[in-house]
Image (spheres, rainbow, N blue to C red):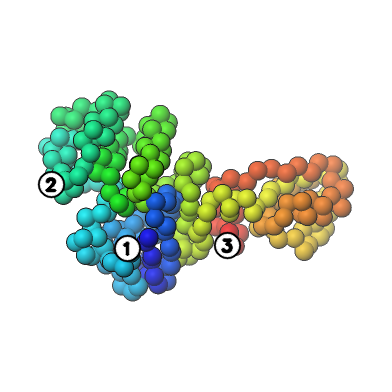
Amino acid sequence: MINILSLTHHLGGAVILQDVNLTIQEGSILGLVGVNGAGKSTLLRLMAGVYLPDEGRVDYDGHTPAEEKTREGIFFLPDDPYFTHNATMCSMLQMYLSLYPSTDKAVYRRLTDGFGLDEKKPLRTFSKGMRRQAYIALALAIRPRYLLLDEAFDGLDPLSRKTVKGELIRLVEETGTTVIISSHSLRELEDFCDSYAIINGKTVSSSGDISEKTARYCRFMLAFAEAVPAGLFDGLPLVSVERSDRFVRAVFDGEAEEIERQLSAFSPAVLERLPVDFEEAFISEIEGGKKL
Protein backbone atom coordinates (compact mmCIF):
# COMPACT_ATOMS: atom_id res chain seq x y z
CA MET A 1 0.00 0.00 0.00
CA ILE A 2 1.14 3.53 -0.77
CA ASN A 3 0.31 6.32 1.67
CA ILE A 4 1.01 9.95 0.81
CA LEU A 5 0.85 11.95 4.01
CA SER A 6 0.58 15.76 4.32
CA LEU A 7 2.93 16.20 1.36
CA THR A 8 3.99 19.70 0.30
CA HIS A 9 6.54 20.59 -2.37
CA HIS A 10 7.95 23.78 -3.89
CA LEU A 11 9.70 24.37 -7.20
CA GLY A 12 11.46 27.63 -7.96
CA GLY A 13 10.01 29.18 -4.83
CA ALA A 14 6.43 28.41 -5.88
CA VAL A 15 4.13 25.98 -4.11
CA ILE A 16 3.32 23.16 -6.54
CA LEU A 17 1.65 20.72 -4.16
CA GLN A 18 0.29 21.45 -0.71
CA ASP A 19 -0.97 19.10 1.98
CA VAL A 20 -1.52 16.15 -0.36
CA ASN A 21 -3.02 13.06 1.25
CA LEU A 22 -3.74 9.91 -0.73
CA THR A 23 -3.92 6.15 -0.14
CA ILE A 24 -3.36 3.76 -3.06
CA GLN A 25 -4.32 0.13 -2.55
CA GLU A 26 -1.99 -2.71 -3.51
CA GLY A 27 -2.65 -4.15 -6.97
CA SER A 28 -4.82 -1.27 -8.15
CA ILE A 29 -4.59 0.84 -11.30
CA LEU A 30 -5.01 4.48 -10.33
CA GLY A 31 -5.60 7.24 -12.86
CA LEU A 32 -3.98 10.51 -11.80
CA VAL A 33 -5.73 13.46 -13.43
CA GLY A 34 -5.66 17.24 -13.38
CA VAL A 35 -5.38 20.22 -15.69
CA ASN A 36 -2.03 21.21 -17.21
CA GLY A 37 0.34 22.39 -14.48
CA ALA A 38 -1.75 20.90 -11.68
CA GLY A 39 1.24 18.97 -10.31
CA LYS A 40 0.72 15.44 -11.65
CA SER A 41 4.31 15.02 -12.89
CA THR A 42 5.69 16.53 -9.69
CA LEU A 43 3.70 14.09 -7.58
CA LEU A 44 4.94 11.13 -9.63
CA ARG A 45 8.54 12.32 -9.23
CA LEU A 46 8.03 12.60 -5.48
CA MET A 47 6.59 9.09 -5.42
CA ALA A 48 9.57 7.80 -7.42
CA GLY A 49 12.11 9.48 -5.15
CA VAL A 50 13.38 11.82 -7.88
CA TYR A 51 12.32 14.73 -5.65
CA LEU A 52 12.35 14.83 -1.87
CA PRO A 53 9.25 16.47 -0.35
CA ASP A 54 9.65 19.71 1.54
CA GLU A 55 7.04 18.52 4.02
CA GLY A 56 5.24 15.26 4.60
CA ARG A 57 6.20 11.89 3.15
CA VAL A 58 5.54 9.15 0.63
CA ASP A 59 5.22 5.82 2.40
CA TYR A 60 5.53 2.39 0.76
CA ASP A 61 4.49 -0.08 3.46
CA GLY A 62 6.41 1.88 6.05
CA HIS A 63 9.38 2.78 3.84
CA THR A 64 10.23 5.86 1.79
CA PRO A 65 11.37 5.88 -1.86
CA ALA A 66 14.70 7.28 -0.67
CA GLU A 67 15.54 3.81 0.67
CA GLU A 68 17.37 1.55 -1.78
CA LYS A 69 15.19 -1.47 -1.03
CA THR A 70 12.06 0.52 -1.86
CA ARG A 71 13.53 1.98 -5.05
CA GLU A 72 14.25 -1.53 -6.34
CA GLY A 73 10.52 -2.12 -6.58
CA ILE A 74 9.67 1.17 -8.32
CA PHE A 75 9.87 1.98 -12.02
CA PHE A 76 9.07 5.52 -13.14
CA LEU A 77 8.53 6.33 -16.81
CA PRO A 78 8.49 10.12 -17.29
CA ASP A 79 6.70 11.91 -20.09
CA ASP A 80 9.94 12.55 -22.01
CA PRO A 81 12.59 9.98 -20.96
CA TYR A 82 16.26 10.83 -21.47
CA PHE A 83 18.38 8.64 -23.73
CA THR A 84 21.92 9.04 -25.06
CA HIS A 85 22.66 9.85 -28.69
CA ASN A 86 23.53 6.28 -29.68
CA ALA A 87 21.11 4.46 -27.38
CA THR A 88 19.17 1.56 -28.86
CA MET A 89 16.54 -0.69 -27.34
CA CYS A 90 19.25 -3.35 -26.97
CA SER A 91 21.51 -1.05 -24.98
CA MET A 92 18.58 0.20 -22.88
CA LEU A 93 17.58 -3.39 -22.10
CA GLN A 94 21.12 -4.22 -20.95
CA MET A 95 21.18 -1.15 -18.71
CA TYR A 96 17.83 -2.00 -17.13
CA LEU A 97 18.84 -5.64 -16.65
CA SER A 98 21.70 -4.41 -14.46
CA LEU A 99 19.19 -2.47 -12.35
CA TYR A 100 16.26 -4.89 -12.54
CA PRO A 101 17.75 -8.39 -13.02
CA SER A 102 14.33 -10.06 -12.91
CA THR A 103 13.24 -8.29 -16.12
CA ASP A 104 11.17 -10.72 -18.21
CA LYS A 105 12.86 -10.97 -21.62
CA ALA A 106 9.94 -12.96 -23.03
CA VAL A 107 7.56 -10.09 -22.28
CA TYR A 108 10.04 -7.62 -23.78
CA ARG A 109 10.34 -9.71 -26.95
CA ARG A 110 6.59 -10.18 -27.29
CA LEU A 111 5.94 -6.44 -27.03
CA THR A 112 8.77 -5.27 -29.28
CA ASP A 113 7.71 -7.79 -31.94
CA GLY A 114 4.08 -6.75 -31.53
CA PHE A 115 4.95 -3.08 -31.92
CA GLY A 116 7.22 -3.86 -34.86
CA LEU A 117 10.25 -2.13 -33.31
CA ASP A 118 13.82 -2.61 -34.51
CA GLU A 119 15.76 -2.94 -31.26
CA LYS A 120 19.09 -2.27 -32.99
CA LYS A 121 18.17 1.12 -34.45
CA PRO A 122 19.07 4.26 -32.47
CA LEU A 123 16.15 5.57 -30.43
CA ARG A 124 16.80 9.04 -31.87
CA THR A 125 15.60 7.75 -35.25
CA PHE A 126 12.26 6.61 -33.76
CA SER A 127 9.14 8.74 -33.95
CA LYS A 128 7.66 10.02 -30.68
CA GLY A 129 5.11 7.22 -30.69
CA MET A 130 7.74 4.56 -31.38
CA ARG A 131 9.92 5.82 -28.53
CA ARG A 132 6.90 5.66 -26.25
CA GLN A 133 6.25 2.07 -27.40
CA ALA A 134 9.88 1.19 -26.73
CA TYR A 135 9.90 2.53 -23.19
CA ILE A 136 6.53 1.00 -22.34
CA ALA A 137 7.79 -2.37 -23.57
CA LEU A 138 10.78 -2.04 -21.24
CA ALA A 139 8.62 -0.87 -18.32
CA LEU A 140 6.20 -3.77 -18.68
CA ALA A 141 9.03 -6.28 -19.04
CA ILE A 142 10.65 -5.06 -15.83
CA ARG A 143 7.42 -6.03 -13.99
CA PRO A 144 8.06 -3.80 -10.98
CA ARG A 145 6.04 -3.85 -7.81
CA TYR A 146 5.12 -0.20 -8.40
CA LEU A 147 4.83 1.23 -11.92
CA LEU A 148 4.56 5.01 -12.28
CA LEU A 149 3.65 6.24 -15.78
CA ASP A 150 3.51 9.90 -16.78
CA GLU A 151 1.32 10.52 -19.87
CA ALA A 152 1.80 6.93 -21.00
CA PHE A 153 -0.51 7.25 -24.01
CA ASP A 154 1.05 10.41 -25.42
CA GLY A 155 1.96 9.84 -29.07
CA LEU A 156 0.48 6.34 -29.29
CA ASP A 157 -1.86 5.33 -32.11
CA PRO A 158 -5.26 3.76 -31.21
CA LEU A 159 -4.07 0.17 -31.70
CA SER A 160 -1.03 0.73 -29.47
CA ARG A 161 -3.24 2.35 -26.85
CA LYS A 162 -5.46 -0.72 -26.82
CA THR A 163 -2.41 -2.98 -26.51
CA VAL A 164 -0.96 -0.98 -23.61
CA LYS A 165 -4.25 -0.98 -21.69
CA GLY A 166 -4.55 -4.73 -22.08
CA GLU A 167 -0.93 -5.28 -21.04
CA LEU A 168 -1.33 -3.14 -17.92
CA ILE A 169 -4.36 -5.14 -16.85
CA ARG A 170 -2.45 -8.35 -17.55
CA LEU A 171 0.54 -7.14 -15.53
CA VAL A 172 -1.62 -6.38 -12.49
CA GLU A 173 -3.46 -9.71 -12.72
CA GLU A 174 -0.25 -11.74 -13.06
CA THR A 175 2.03 -9.94 -10.61
CA GLY A 176 -0.11 -7.73 -8.36
CA THR A 177 1.76 -4.64 -9.54
CA THR A 178 0.35 -1.31 -8.42
CA VAL A 179 0.06 1.10 -11.36
CA ILE A 180 -0.25 4.88 -11.12
CA ILE A 181 -0.80 6.49 -14.50
CA SER A 182 -1.36 10.12 -15.42
CA SER A 183 -3.11 11.00 -18.64
CA HIS A 184 -5.17 13.72 -20.29
CA SER A 185 -7.31 11.02 -21.90
CA LEU A 186 -9.81 10.53 -19.10
CA ARG A 187 -12.13 8.31 -21.11
CA GLU A 188 -9.23 5.92 -21.69
CA LEU A 189 -8.40 5.87 -18.01
CA GLU A 190 -11.99 4.97 -17.26
CA ASP A 191 -11.61 1.93 -19.55
CA PHE A 192 -9.10 0.14 -17.33
CA CYS A 193 -8.42 2.09 -14.12
CA ASP A 194 -10.27 1.00 -10.98
CA SER A 195 -9.49 4.13 -8.96
CA TYR A 196 -8.63 7.78 -9.49
CA ALA A 197 -7.16 10.87 -7.84
CA ILE A 198 -7.86 14.41 -9.03
CA ILE A 199 -5.27 17.10 -8.38
CA ASN A 200 -6.96 20.48 -8.13
CA GLY A 201 -5.95 23.56 -6.17
CA LYS A 202 -2.46 22.11 -5.50
CA THR A 203 -3.84 19.14 -3.61
CA VAL A 204 -5.76 15.90 -4.16
CA SER A 205 -9.30 17.27 -4.15
CA SER A 206 -10.96 13.86 -4.46
CA SER A 207 -10.08 10.21 -4.93
CA GLY A 208 -11.69 6.80 -4.83
CA ASP A 209 -13.37 4.17 -6.99
CA ILE A 210 -14.13 5.43 -10.51
CA SER A 211 -17.32 3.42 -11.01
CA GLU A 212 -18.73 4.44 -7.63
CA LYS A 213 -18.07 8.12 -8.23
CA THR A 214 -19.55 8.26 -11.71
CA ALA A 215 -22.56 6.24 -10.51
CA ARG A 216 -23.48 8.88 -7.93
CA TYR A 217 -23.80 11.55 -10.65
CA CYS A 218 -26.73 12.00 -12.97
CA ARG A 219 -27.18 14.24 -15.99
CA PHE A 220 -30.38 15.50 -17.58
CA MET A 221 -31.26 17.31 -20.76
CA LEU A 222 -34.38 19.44 -20.64
CA ALA A 223 -36.21 21.44 -23.29
CA PHE A 224 -39.07 23.88 -22.71
CA ALA A 225 -41.69 25.33 -25.05
CA GLU A 226 -41.16 28.72 -23.45
CA ALA A 227 -38.29 30.22 -21.48
CA VAL A 228 -36.53 28.11 -18.90
CA PRO A 229 -38.56 28.41 -15.67
CA ALA A 230 -37.13 30.41 -12.79
CA GLY A 231 -36.12 28.35 -9.78
CA LEU A 232 -35.65 25.21 -11.87
CA PHE A 233 -32.75 23.99 -9.75
CA ASP A 234 -33.76 25.37 -6.35
CA GLY A 235 -33.05 22.82 -3.66
CA LEU A 236 -31.34 20.39 -6.06
CA PRO A 237 -27.71 19.23 -5.70
CA LEU A 238 -26.57 20.98 -8.88
CA VAL A 239 -22.94 20.49 -9.92
CA SER A 240 -22.83 22.16 -13.33
CA VAL A 241 -25.24 23.50 -15.91
CA GLU A 242 -25.24 24.57 -19.56
CA ARG A 243 -28.04 26.78 -20.91
CA SER A 244 -28.92 27.58 -24.50
CA ASP A 245 -32.18 29.41 -25.20
CA ARG A 246 -34.87 26.94 -24.11
CA PHE A 247 -32.49 24.00 -23.61
CA VAL A 248 -30.68 22.98 -20.44
CA ARG A 249 -28.10 20.30 -19.66
CA ALA A 250 -27.34 19.83 -15.99
CA VAL A 251 -25.27 17.48 -13.85
CA PHE A 252 -26.37 16.64 -10.31
CA ASP A 253 -24.77 14.89 -7.37
CA GLY A 254 -27.72 12.94 -6.05
CA GLU A 255 -30.41 10.31 -6.55
CA ALA A 256 -31.48 10.35 -10.21
CA GLU A 257 -35.08 9.23 -9.65
CA GLU A 258 -35.77 11.93 -7.05
CA ILE A 259 -34.14 14.64 -9.16
CA GLU A 260 -36.10 13.54 -12.22
CA ARG A 261 -39.33 13.70 -10.20
CA GLN A 262 -38.63 17.28 -9.15
CA LEU A 263 -37.66 18.36 -12.65
CA SER A 264 -40.84 16.79 -14.06
CA ALA A 265 -42.89 19.18 -11.93
CA PHE A 266 -41.84 21.98 -14.31
CA SER A 267 -43.49 20.11 -17.23
CA PRO A 268 -40.58 20.24 -19.68
CA ALA A 269 -41.28 19.32 -23.30
CA VAL A 270 -38.27 17.02 -23.11
CA LEU A 271 -36.71 15.43 -20.05
CA GLU A 272 -34.01 12.88 -20.80
CA ARG A 273 -31.52 11.25 -18.47
CA LEU A 274 -28.01 10.99 -19.94
CA PRO A 275 -25.03 8.92 -18.78
CA VAL A 276 -22.14 10.60 -16.99
CA ASP A 277 -18.60 9.43 -17.72
CA PHE A 278 -15.42 10.13 -15.79
CA GLU A 279 -14.36 12.98 -18.06
CA GLU A 280 -17.64 14.80 -17.47
CA ALA A 281 -17.38 14.24 -13.75
CA PHE A 282 -13.84 15.66 -13.80
CA ILE A 283 -14.91 18.74 -15.76
CA SER A 284 -17.83 19.27 -13.39
CA GLU A 285 -15.50 19.27 -10.41
CA ILE A 286 -12.90 21.56 -11.94
CA GLU A 287 -15.35 24.06 -13.41
CA GLY A 288 -17.87 23.86 -10.62
CA GLY A 289 -15.32 23.93 -7.84
CA LYS A 290 -17.10 21.08 -6.07
CA LYS A 291 -15.70 17.79 -4.94
CA LEU A 292 -16.86 14.48 -6.37
Residue 118 versus residue 30 in the image, above or below = above
C-alpha separation, residue under disc 3 versus residue under disc 1: 27 Å
Q: Quadrant of the N terminus?
A: bottom left
Residue 234: numbered disc: none
Is tag 2's residue or tag 3's residue first in the polypeptide sequence?
Answer: 2
Q: Position of residue 234 (x, y in %)?
A: 78, 62
**Residue carrying label 1:** 60
Dot 3 or dot 1, earlier in sequence: 1
At label 1, which amino acid type do we have?
Tyr
Work out whether residue 242 can be spotted.
Answer: no
Q: Position of residue 65 (x, y in %)?
A: 26, 63
Q: CA distance from mark 2 to mark 3?
A: 45 Å
Is disc 2 placed on a helix, strand or loop? Answer: helix
Percent across and percent down for residue 138 are: 24, 40
Count of numbered tags: 3
| Residue beneath disc 2 | 98
Q: CA distance from mark 1 to mark 2?
A: 23 Å
The residue to which callout 3 is attached is 291
- Residue located at (42% from left, 49% from top): 29
Q: Position of residue 56 (x, y in %)?
A: 35, 73
Q: Which badge, 1 or 2, is on the more N-terminal residue? A: 1
Residue that appears at 50% across and 59% down: 207
Q: Looking at the image, can residue 158 be seen?
A: yes
Q: Nearer the viewer, mark 2 or mark 3?
A: 2
State the residue in front, 121 or 74: 74
The reply, left or right, for residue 34 in relation to residue 54 is: right
Which amino acid is tagged 3? Lys
